[in-house]
Amino acid sequence: MESIVKQSLLYDFYGELLTEHQRSIYEDVVYNDMSLSEIAEENGISRQGVHDLIKRCDKTLSAYEDKLHLISKFQTTRRMVEEIHKKTRIFKETKDESLIDEIEQISNDIMEL
Amino acid sequence: MESIVKQSLLYDFYGELLTEHQRSIYEDVVYNDMSLSEIAEENGISRQGVHDLIKRCDKTLSAYEDKLHLISKFQTTRRMVEEIHKKTRIFKETKDESLIDEIEQISNDIMEL
């Protein structure tokens, strides 16, 4: 299975494309931190059934990202915005105006992504 | 049908989820600015067939956005980044340091979206 961090990101972006049943069980794993046995018992299915369902969801969600790359696009933007944020804080300490040129450049680069 | 601008945005985000045949015809409309009659002739199908295919693609692509809202999320971020860009330019003219606080705030807001 995928890591919890990756699962939660995939679910956050593409979870709405799963069925309601899949979503409910996937959320129990990713957000509610439940064990496969607990989920199995709660839903009246086997532990192996839960395991297979999660693996199938991982595969479905990853396939969307492989086609659309929207998580990767968002993360690139996010890292660049963090860079802008950091530079505003350094500017406030140093008053180094070249930082503002850098922020202008980064914001421009984001708009061209 | 959707406007060309909306079609091109939908295609840009979700086009990979169409079939290759759908993509090829949708691109002829959206990017290659071909008329329905031209596309019909080129693909050996009726003008009505092309029209129906485009409408079906519009519906498929819009359904993805209705579920995932990723275009809308990207556009919100983009508008905020444009705001940052504008403020760097005003700062360079005015040296008004309150603009840097505003940029810090906007970048923070983007990271919390």
Image: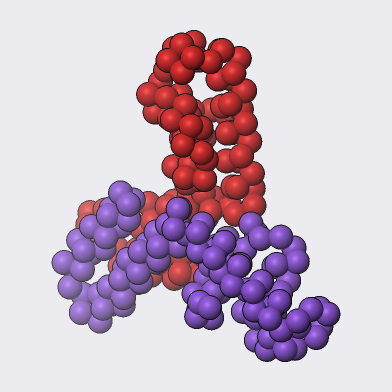
Chain colours: A purple, B red
Query: Which is nearer the eye, B55 or B112?
Result: B55
- B52 left or right of B40 in image: right
Query: Which is nearer the eye, B65 or B108?
Result: B65
Residue B10 appears in view = no
Residue B5 rendering spot, x and y as whole percentages: 47, 32
- B83 left or right of B94 in image: right
The N terminus of chain B lies in quadrant: top right
B41 shown above or below B101: above
Residue B31 rendering spot, x and y as whole percentages: 39, 28
A43 shown above or below B107: below
Query: Which is nearer the eye, A66 or B45?
Result: B45
Q: Residue at x 45, y 69 (%)?
A: B111
Residue B39 rendering spot, x and y as whole percentages: 46, 17
Q: Residue at x 60, y 67 (%)?
A: A56
Residue B107: name its quadrant: bottom left
Q: Residue at x 27, y 55 (%)?
A: A109
Residue B87 rendering spot, x and y as whole percentages: 33, 56
Count of residue discs: 0
Query: Which is nearer the eye, A111 or A48?
Result: A48
- B103 left or right of B37 in image: left
Residue A91: name its quadrant: bottom left
Q: Residue at x 52, y 45 (%)?
A: B17
- A13 left or right of A84 in image: right
B65 shown above or below A83: above
Residue A7 appears in view = yes
